[in-house]
Structures are given as C-alpha cells and as structure tokens.
Image (tube, rainbow, N blue to C red):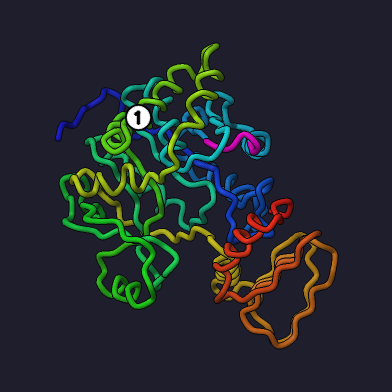
Amino acid sequence: MSNNESPIPAIERLTCLIPAGGMGTRLWPLSRANAPKFLLDLTGSGNSLLRTTWDRLAPLTPAERIMVVTGNSHRRSVAEQLPELLPDNLITESEPKDSSAAIGLAAAILELRDPDAILGSFAADHVIRGDVLFQRAVTTAVQAADRGYIATIGIHPSHPATGFGYIAGGEARRDIAPYDVYDVTEFVEKPDAAQAEAYLEDGRYLWNAGMFIARATVLLDQMALQQPSLVSALREIAAAWSTERGAEVRERLWPTLPKIAIDYTVAEPAAAAGKMVCVAAHFEWDDVGDFASVANLLTRGGRGGDLAVLGDGAQVLSDASSGIVVSESDRLVALVGVEDVVVVDTADVLLVTSKSRAQDVKNLVNRMKVNGGGHLL
C-alpha cells in the first residue's frame, strides 16, 4: 500500500469532526428533540458532553481544524456552547440522514479544502476518562490513516457489556506501531449476555466506540464502492457549499440521500477488504446510552454512594435506596427501600423505571410517536 507521503506531518493534517446528532431516546424525558443528550451535562461536571468532547480534541488540533455537523435546529445551541468554532466549520443538516451522509459530507468539504487532509470522527455524546491515553490512541490512528488505512479505536472491555458493538482484532500490525494496532477481522453487533462473556474471555474483542480516522479521500472512495450515488451527491453538495448555488444544491439533493450508518458503507466493507485497522485503547469509555449508564458513571468509585443524583438544586431524600434520580423540578423526591430505581422528574413528565429496564425507555418514545405524544419528545 502506498504511503502517499505529504511534506506536512500527519498529525498536522488532522481535522477532527464532531457529529452531534440524535435525540438519545433512551434518555427521555431528559433528552428531547430540542435538548438532545449531547447538549446536556450528564456527568455533573458543569459542561455538556459536546463541550467536553471539544476540550478533549483541542490538544490534538487547533480550533480552525475542528468541525461539527449537526441539525439545523441545534445550530444556535452548538454555536453558543462552542464559541471557538469557526462558522465555516459548522455544517448543518436540514434533516437527519444517519452517519454516512453526515460524516461523508464533512469529508467531502474537507477533501476540497485539503486533498491530503486526515479526518477523525468522534461522537459528541460519549464520556471518556483518560484524555492523555485518548490522545495517544488518536495519534497512533493518524499514523495508520497516513498509510492509507481506515483506522478505528477499540476499547478494552471492562465487563461483558451487551449494549455495545464489538470489534474482532486480528494480526498485530507492528509495521504501523510497535503495539496496540491490529487488523480488523469483523465488526460484531450487540451480543447477548453469554456471547459478551465469551468475548471478554477471548481477549481479542474490543468495544466499538464508533471512532473513524482516515484520509478524507480514502474514506469517501471506500464509501463510494458501496454507495456511489450517495458519494457523488455529497461531493456535488460540497463543491457548491460556499457558493451562491449552495442552498439550492443542498435543498435539491439532501432529501434524496439514503439513511445508512457508516458501519455498513465504510467500516464493515473496509474490514472485509483488509483496509481497516484498530488501535486498542486503554482509556475508560461509555456512550451513556441510558440512565443505567449515567447512574454507573456518577457512582463509580463510590462517588455519591449507591444513589446517583443529577440536576441543579435537586432535592432528594433517600432511605435504603439505590439507582438514580434526575430532577429538573423543585419538588422533593423521596425514596424508601427501592433498589436500582430510575426516577426522572421534569416539568411535564415523570418517568419511573429500573436500571435493568432503562434501555426499554426507547419503546415508550416509539409508542408516543405513533399515538400522538410527539409534543413531549
């Protein structure tokens, strides 16, 4: 494989993309269409997940090389939370089209700005502990991307999680880095409990954190092998993006794009073709997919005892109870003798469930979409 060497060091050609989309339906009613989870503080740090993501990427690349793609309705909120973000680096979607279109459009715009650019995509709504380890992993992934590979970052699992996808690692790639880089043999969907246990014991399986690092052109060319019309449209939109025709081209083409995840257009086909490598990382990671995840983050290491509480001014009285209370009201929430409970108290919705059923909140959201409860979403 050609090195495609550039006179500019690889890390200096890295542009970081933050895809900021999705409502986070399993975190309803806290996360809603007008206040999705990436705009919320779910860790009690005082910063939103989006802001924390930006701060994590800032040591890797200057502000002029950080892009965000989000929906039109969140443009103002994103700009307010990220005052350093250049207007030209804020890409908005008129309607959600999933990750292939969102990341692909950013890659197409970047490709025109710098044909040698390397794009790294890092979701806006994940929690990472160990920023130095994260930055080391990204730097290694950039080295692989500069060699023409599509790189991802996998997380060493700490427990047999059934809520994450997995990456199966193959041969070590010491030609890229002396350690922690492997061929990807396959991507595996969320397993059941028994399979997750087997993955943990096997040792070759890593959590799929959905991070992708590649030359912008390489990523688009790989996507075009699966979806040529999608990539053609994205490149046409990108070519007109900053011109007088930009709005007209976007309005004409964007609604026609298919909704398809980048896992299916890039990651899985690239792995099958031997073009995908994985950096095995050692930082702590969570996609904060439901209230059980939030509770576990807030109580990790004994912080806050067995009951996590989230919300400015939350009033909670607890006796022999565990789980999580999220309060956006001035009401007192009193718990007596309930274990692993989830209570979310907002101005118009009170949600009560258990940590074990926290992922099922999405089912309620789907029912409301069908039964006329859309005004609460």
Q: Nearer the viewer, residue 350 or 166?
A: 350
Circle 1 sits on which residue? 229
Q: Amino acid at mark 1?
A: Ser
* Residue toward you, 260 or 28: 260
Can residue 131 be seen? Answer: yes
Placement of 306 over or under 149, stated as above or below: below
Taking the spot 64% from the left edge, 33% from the top edge, the residue there is 83
Q: Is residue 254 left or right of residue 350?
A: left
* Residue projecting furthest to the front: 371
* Residue 304 position within the rendered picture, expressed as x and y whole percent measured from the top left: 65, 73
Depth check, front residue: 187 or 146: 187
Q: Is residue 71 magenta?
A: yes
| Residue located at (78% from left, 73% from top) | 316
Tell me, yes or no, if residue 140 can be seen here. Answer: no
Q: Position of residue 62 (x, y in %)?
A: 48, 32
Q: Position of residue 25 (x, y in %)?
A: 59, 57
- State the extent of the magenta-drawn residues as a range: 69-74
Q: For residue 34, what is the image quadrant?
A: top right
